[in-house]
Amino acid sequence: MAYNILIVDDSLTARTFIARTLEIAEVPLSHVYQAGNGQEALEVLQREWVDLVFADINMPVMNGVELIRQMRANDLFKAIPVIIISTDRSTHRMNELKDAGVQAYLTKPFTPEDLKATIERFLASGNGGAS
């Protein structure tokens, strides 16, 4: 099964790196969508079926925590797994993310193997959406 994945980060370089890492990890992909902030991500989610979201925390317009809160409040998006990719591992931030409904957290930098293992944990096991 190939997956639709949304990468949300205000850095084009980070989005490109994550997309390339998905390819290196040989994750079966149907489509990779990208958004520069949480608001853009919600617009993509309104238009496209997404199986999994990778999101940064610190972004302009709408940050990752607010994106997750809005997704969890929407019946169409609340079951989509969200994995945070960030350098911020403070206790306060981790608790905030857990309360918002984050399923997993990858610390930058990460390996293709880390990324693939995290994806498989949610999608191959059926915890995520299906396309």
Image (spheres, helix red, strand yellow):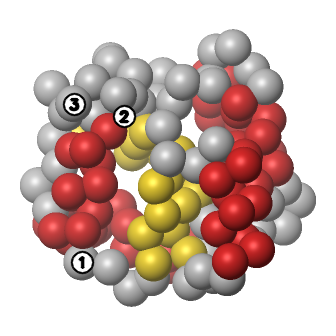
Residue depicted at x 67% and y 82%: 90
Which residue position holds label 3? 125
Q: Position of residue 102 (x, y in %)?
A: 58, 49
- Label at residue 130: none
Q: Amino acid at mark 3?
A: Ser
Q: Residue furthest top?
A: 75
Which residue position holds label 1? 111
Circle 2 SS class? strand
Q: Amino acid at mark 2?
A: Asn
Mark 2 and mark 1: Cα distance apart in space: 20 Å
Q: Amino acid at mark 1?
A: Thr
The residue mark sitting in front, 2 or 3, is: 3
Mark 2 and mark 3: Cα distance apart in space: 16 Å
Asked whether, in this view, residue 15 is left or right of residue 127, the answer is right
Residue 84 vertical placement versus 119 (above, below): below
The residue mark sitting in front, 2 or 1, is: 1
Which residue position holds label 2? 4
Asked whether, in this view, residue 122 is left or right of residue 113, the answer is right
Within 10 Å of disc 2 (Cα), the crowding (few <14, some 14-19, many 20+) is: some
